[in-house]
Image (cartoon, coloured by chain):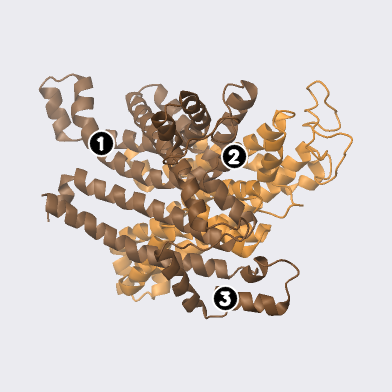
């Protein structure tokens, strides 16, 4: 059996990526049981400790402490929860909004296509960083606001790419056949068009997760992301940036965490694109 | 031929105007959703309700939203971006004072990104069908995974903190006075013959510019490689081989010229992204440009300043995209035929 799933699972990139994502996801899901400390617990007598293996380290704080004496390992683990929540909710939200609009505009064409197309053009002429900053000013801070801002900025990525894919699929004979057999618009889109655009959709979601992790880190770094009492990798970086000479590890560890998550989602997206794209698979045979 | 090109370029520029109007209207509306009252913010906390009401009328905040937008648009078109509430200075002059620093950084970063992108793309193409291909391919995905935000921090850590080779805050070393002629520091220092300032400015620019270049070059590399791969399927490459040209000559004189076109388009798009990417790099390196002004304004909910800086970013990116479109028309003979 050489289905798309088994083909994907034979790809080393997909396997490597899934391994990493499962590791980070495990930290996020079971943060409460694996983190050695409460992430907001302060020990002001033990501030800016180096990791346990360095001289001056304390085995109670395996990766050291930050400027308020909070455990860096625990904050990294809870930060994974924030990052993964944003990655999943924001990418699915952007996918739902973007792909519904893409299927409507690609399927019906005409005036709807023109209106949504122009809306995407205008939206994309805002630089994404600027747009998300401005939205965060309007929305206020918080995990749900970060997710909403990312959805509002990034639905256009899905809309633009999927629309052209829908247009390609619409020209296929089986779509015309479905219409001739008396399928309703909804049946045609859900049974004939959607299965053909699904591989691209899945790939885009994976890439969007990588983008969402970065955007969340950026917003938290600037201080406009999640609330201050919620641990986030971007916040840890902003804090460590001020004490970079005293404890360089505090800067390096969250940077590494962001890099690993982003690389994992990008590798997954790339691996899935290669193994799900029927044209690529067939030309390789 | 020149008139056709000019006509096409003119049409692209005209098309940018409605987009700009809608963008400015959207920007205005989003910021009006804010739960803060600019009138109350620009008065001392002891102000009475009547004083706040008077201020609101003076600022035009009692007018309906479309009316407010038209007033603001009219002011902006006359060069009046309003006053920053937090810094109590003209928003327009604040933007004018910081924009050259950001442009300097963005232009230098783009030149580095183009060099790295084209060089890397050629290397990646050279590695095709060899054992290195998988390594290079994987490497380029990993490189794509490092945004300018992380490069900024990594370079700061390695060259600023660990090796202590380069400074990583501001635009100049403390104690050096900045000559004010154009606002472009490299240019000003050269004109006024201050080579100590010039050296310091270069040192301060290097890390942020390299961070941006490293983040934006992998996309250029990948497109150059794939368009070279496409071009090598064309008949004229086979024909050049039959004529006995060396592989190097085929690549440089025939393939590269044709593969450069899609790559340049993408590089142009990347320049637009890169310009807004300067925001984070500026924050990381405390570089006194538009990005730090924006973040400052955002943190203080300084509405007039956010509007002015936000609009500046949008205008610059739109200008870059229009320029790239026009350049594409000039370079691509196929688009000129009508």
On the image, numbered disc 1 is attached to which residue? Answer: B259
State the residue at coordinates (39%, 68%): A116
Depth check, mark 1 against mark 3: the one in front is 3
Q: Where residue A111 sits: x, y (%)?
A: 32, 74
Q: Is A29 placed left or right of A38 in the picture?
A: left
A26 up-or-down from B191: above or below: below
Q: Is A160 placed left or right of A94 in the picture?
A: left
Residue sitting nearer the eye, A94 or A43: A43
Disc marking residue B58:
3
On the image, numbered disc 2 is attached to which residue? Answer: B286
Quick one: quadrant of the C terminus of chain A? top left
Say whether residue B239 is visible: yes
Q: Earlier in the sequence, mark 2 or mark 3?
A: 3
Residue sitting nearer the eye, A101 or B296: B296
Q: Residues within 10 Å of mark 2 (few under 14, many from 20)?
A: some
Residue sitting nearer the eye, B274 or B44: B44
B93 up-or-down from B155: above or below: below
Q: Earlier in the sequence, mark 1 or mark 3?
A: 3
User: Which image quarter: residue B281?
Assistant: top right
**Residues at marks 1 and 3 touching, judged by CB atoms closer than 8 Å:** no
Q: Where residue A172 sits: x, y (%)?
A: 29, 61
**Residues at marks 1 and 2 touching, judged by CB atoms closer than 8 Å:** no
The chain carrying label 2 is: B
Colour-to-chain, brown: B
């Amino acid at each position: 059996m050489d289905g798309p799933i088994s083909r994907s699972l034979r790809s080393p990139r997909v396997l490597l990526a899934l391994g990493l994502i499962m590791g980070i996801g495990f930290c996020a899901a079971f943060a409460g049981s694996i983190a050695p400390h409460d992430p907001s617990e302060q020990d002001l007598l033990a501030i800016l400790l180096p990791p346990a293996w360095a001289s001056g380290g304390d085995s109670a704080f395996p990766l050291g402490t930050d400027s308020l004496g909070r455990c860096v390992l625990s904050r990294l683990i809870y930060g994974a929860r924030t990052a993964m929540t944003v990655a999943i909710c924001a990418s699915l939200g952007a996918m739902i909004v973007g792909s519904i609009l893409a299927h409507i505009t690609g399927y019906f064409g005409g005036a709807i296509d023109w209106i949504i197309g122009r809306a995407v053009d205008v939206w994309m002429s805002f630089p994404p960083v600027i747009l998300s900053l401005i939205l965060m000013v309007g929305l206020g801070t918080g995990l749900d606001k970060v997710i909403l801002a990312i959805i509002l900025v990034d639905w256009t990525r899905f809309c633009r790419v999927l629309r052209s894919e829908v247009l390609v699929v619409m020209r296929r004979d089986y779509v015309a056949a479905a219409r001739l057999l008396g399928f309703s618009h909804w049946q045609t889109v859900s049974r004939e068009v959607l299965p053909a655009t699904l591989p691209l959709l899945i790939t885009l979601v994976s890439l969007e997760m990588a983008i969402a992790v970065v955007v969340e880190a950026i917003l938290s770094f600037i201080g406009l992301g999640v609330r201050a009492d919620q641990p986030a990798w971007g916040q840890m970086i902003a804090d460590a940036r001020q004490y970079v000479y005293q404890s360089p590890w505090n800067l390096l560890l969250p940077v590494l965490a962001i890099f690993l998550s982003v690389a994992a989602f990008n590798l997954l997206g790339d691996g899935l694109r290669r193994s799900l794209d029927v044209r690529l698979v067939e030309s390789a045979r | 031929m020149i008139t056709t090109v000019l006509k096409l370029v003119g049409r692209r520029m005209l098309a940018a105007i409605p987009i700009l109007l809608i963008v400015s209207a959207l920007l205005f509306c989003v910021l009006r959703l804010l739960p803060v009252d600019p009138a109350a913010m620009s008065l001392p906390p002891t102000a009475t309700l009547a004083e706040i009401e008077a201020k609101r009328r003076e600022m035009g905040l009692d007018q309906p939203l479309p009316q407010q937008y038209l007033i603001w648009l009219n002011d902006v078109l006359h060069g009046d971006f309003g006053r920053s509430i937090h810094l109590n200075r003209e928003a327009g002059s604040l933007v004018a004072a910081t924009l050259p620093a950001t442009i300097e950084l963005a232009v230098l970063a783009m030149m580095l990104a183009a060099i790295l992108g084209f060089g890397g793309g050629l290397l990646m193409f050279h590695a095709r069908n060899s054992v290195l291909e998988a390594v290079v391919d994987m490497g380029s995905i990993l490189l794509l995974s490092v945004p300018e935000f992380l490069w900024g921090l990594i370079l700061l850590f390695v060259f600023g903190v660990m090796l202590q080779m380069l400074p990583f805050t501001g635009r100049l070393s403390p104690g050096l006075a900045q000559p004010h002629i154009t606002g472009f520091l490299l240019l000003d220092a050269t004109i006024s013959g201050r080579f100590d300032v010039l050296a310091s400015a270069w040192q301060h620019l290097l890390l942020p510019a390299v961070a941006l270049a490293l983040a934006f070059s992998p996309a250029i590399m990948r497109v150059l490689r794939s368009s070279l791969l496409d071009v090598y399927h064309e008949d004229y490459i086979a024909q050049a081989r039959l004529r006995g040209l060396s592989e190097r000559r085929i690549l440089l004189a025939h393939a590269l010229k044709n593969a450069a076109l899609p790559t340049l388009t993408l590089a142009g798009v990347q320049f637009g992204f890169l310009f807004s990417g300067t925001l984070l790099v500026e924050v990381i390196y405390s570089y006194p440009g538009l990005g730090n002004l924006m973040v400052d304004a955002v943190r203080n909910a300084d509405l007039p300043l956010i509007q002015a800086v936000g609009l500046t970013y949008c205008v610059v990116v739109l200008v870059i995209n229009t320029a790239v479109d026009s350049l594409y028309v000039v370079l691509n003979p196929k688009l000129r035929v009508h």
